[in-house]
Image (tube, helix red, strand yellow):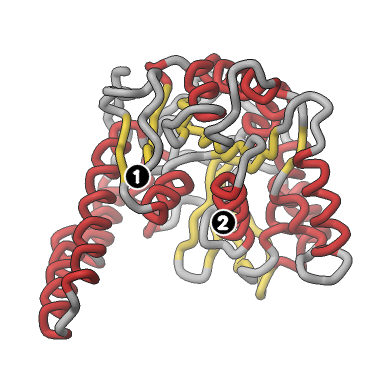
């Protein structure tokens, strides 16, 4: 697949240039690379064991290569699909995953999977090779990359689960999980934890089952009965994911999340929400009435491009909201984003260039 074209930035005036220079002075790339080198030197002084050094060396190599592979597609919307490698083509979940992959490719989304068989192969068969990306795990007993993605330059082979899981979450804009075993549940729960704790920006998380299936309905009952009722999660945490057995509902959940909302970014103590539609003063007042509890101090306000958003200048013209978020009410923040998406009129489909890097 040809990487998405990047158009030159328009109307970069002197103030924007000054912003870029300001950020470069704060933390140039060369300084970060020097920090990595200094850390490596400290390992020698610390007397790190060969085993520790091998882990660090391999992890760094894997991530460097994975970043390189994903870099040309950073502004292209992507969805990760998790699910069992053991699901057979005649199983209803296979068709669900295949249909979902096809629908997302039709919406110009790329589909990322673990590159193995079962649900992973089904989703990539649906998307087609051009819209497929794979993160294969090297295991002693399995798995080889499936025929859809094998040999493709958009396939990355990884030794460690933790580096692979980082890429699954870092490089995508949505997660969809079909039924699976321990590995699938591990990936789903870690993704939920990262979003719930604010270690990963908000994104749609869909738990997708076969029509009439009980896999995720049983999970949802367990979450309500054992986690929510016992105070182990907050009521708002149920808003962080959606359970469905309908492919179109899953697609709508993913696309609808970005209908008005674009992205979020922390700039020091400020949380900035980028939108595709400017909210009215009356609507902002409503947000303050309904969601004042998520503010550590102050209130929700309209905003413009912050000087420290210089690396996202392609989003400069998007309307913004800003608030001092309490950093713990992520479920409530998701509920506010859902309200924004429901109540504001979405604009026409987006350019793929309007994505944060």
Q: Position of residue 225 (x, y in %)?
A: 88, 59
Q: Nearer the viewer, residue 62 or 9?
A: 62
Q: Residue at x 59, y 23 (%)?
A: 88
Q: Quadrant of residue 73?
A: top left
Q: Residue furthest bottom?
A: 46
Which labelled disc corresponds to residue 50?
A: none
**Residue 282 location in percent, x, y?**
78, 48
Residue 190 - label = 2
- The residue depicted at 29 percent of the width and 43 percent of the height is 66
Q: Answer left or right for 51 relative to 206.
A: left
Q: CA distance from mark 2 to mark 1?
A: 24 Å
Classed neighbour count for the residue bearing mark 1: other residues with Cα under 10 Å, few (<14), some (14–19), many (≥20):
few
Q: What residue is at 81 percent from the left and 37 percent from the top?
A: 214
In the image, residue 268 sits, relative to residue 322, either above or below, namely: below
Left or right for 166, reference 328: left
Q: Nearer the viewer, residue 210 or 132?
A: 210
Closer to us: 245 or 336: 245
Q: What secondary structure is found at the residue carrying circle 1?
A: loop
Outermost residue, front direction?
A: 141
Please say if 75 is above or below 221.
above
Which numbered disc, 2 or 1, marks the residue that appears first in the sequence? 1
Question: Where, quadrant-wise, is the N terminus in this rendering?
Answer: top left
Checking the image for residue 140, the label placed there is 1
* Circle 2: element type: helix
Instruction: Please tell me whether mark 2 or mark 1 is closer to you in this view.
Output: 1
Say if 195 sits above or below 254 in the image: below
Q: Residue at x 83, y 27 (%)?
A: 212
Q: Which one is nearer the viewer's eye here, 319 or 191?
A: 191
Question: Which quadrant does the C terminus fall into?
Answer: top left
């Amino acid at each position: 697949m040809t990487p998405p074209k990047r158009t030159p930035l328009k109307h970069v005036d002197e103030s924007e240039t000054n912003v870029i220079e300001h950020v470069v002075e704060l933390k140039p790339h060369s300084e970060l690379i020097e920090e990595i080198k200094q850390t490596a030197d400290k390992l020698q002084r610390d007397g790190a064991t060969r085993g520790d050094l091998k882990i660090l060396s391999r992890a760094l190599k894997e991530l460097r290569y994975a970043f390189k592979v994903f870099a040309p597609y950073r502004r292209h919307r992507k969805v990760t699909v998790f699910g069992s490698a053991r699901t057979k083509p005649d199983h209803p979940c296979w068709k669900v995953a295949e249909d979902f992959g096809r629908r997302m490719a039709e919406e110009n989304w790329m589909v990322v999977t673990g590159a193995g068989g079962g649900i992973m192969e089904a989703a990539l068969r649906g998307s087609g090779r051009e819209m497929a990306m794979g993160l294969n795990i090297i295991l002693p007993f399995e798995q080889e990359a499936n025929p859809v993605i094998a040999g493709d330059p958009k396939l990355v082979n990884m030794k460690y689960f933790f580096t692979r899981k980082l890429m699954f979450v870092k490089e995508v804009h949505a997660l969809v999980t079909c039924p699976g075993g321990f590995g699938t549940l591990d990936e789903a729960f870690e993704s939920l934890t990262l979003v719930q704790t604010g270690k990963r920006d908000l994104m749609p998380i869909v738990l997708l089952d076969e029509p009439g299936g009980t896999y995720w309905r049983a999970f949802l009952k367990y979450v309500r009965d054992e986690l929510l009722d016992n105070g182990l999660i907050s009521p708002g945490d149920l808003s962080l994911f959606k359970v469905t057995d309908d492919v179109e509902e899953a697609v709508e959940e993913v696309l609808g999340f970005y209908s008005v909302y674009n992205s979020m970014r922390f700039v020091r103590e400020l949380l900035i929400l980028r939108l595709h539609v400017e909210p009215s003063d009356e609507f902002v007042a409503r947000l303050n009435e309904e969601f004042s509890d998520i503010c550590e101090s102050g209130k929700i306000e309209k905003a413009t491009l912050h000087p420290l958003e210089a690396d996202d200048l392609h989003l400069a013209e998007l309307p913004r909201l800003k608030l001092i978020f309490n950093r713990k009410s992520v479920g409530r923040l998701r509920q506010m984003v859902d309200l924004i998406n429901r109540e504001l009129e979405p604009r026409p489909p987006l350019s793929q260039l309007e994505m944060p890097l």
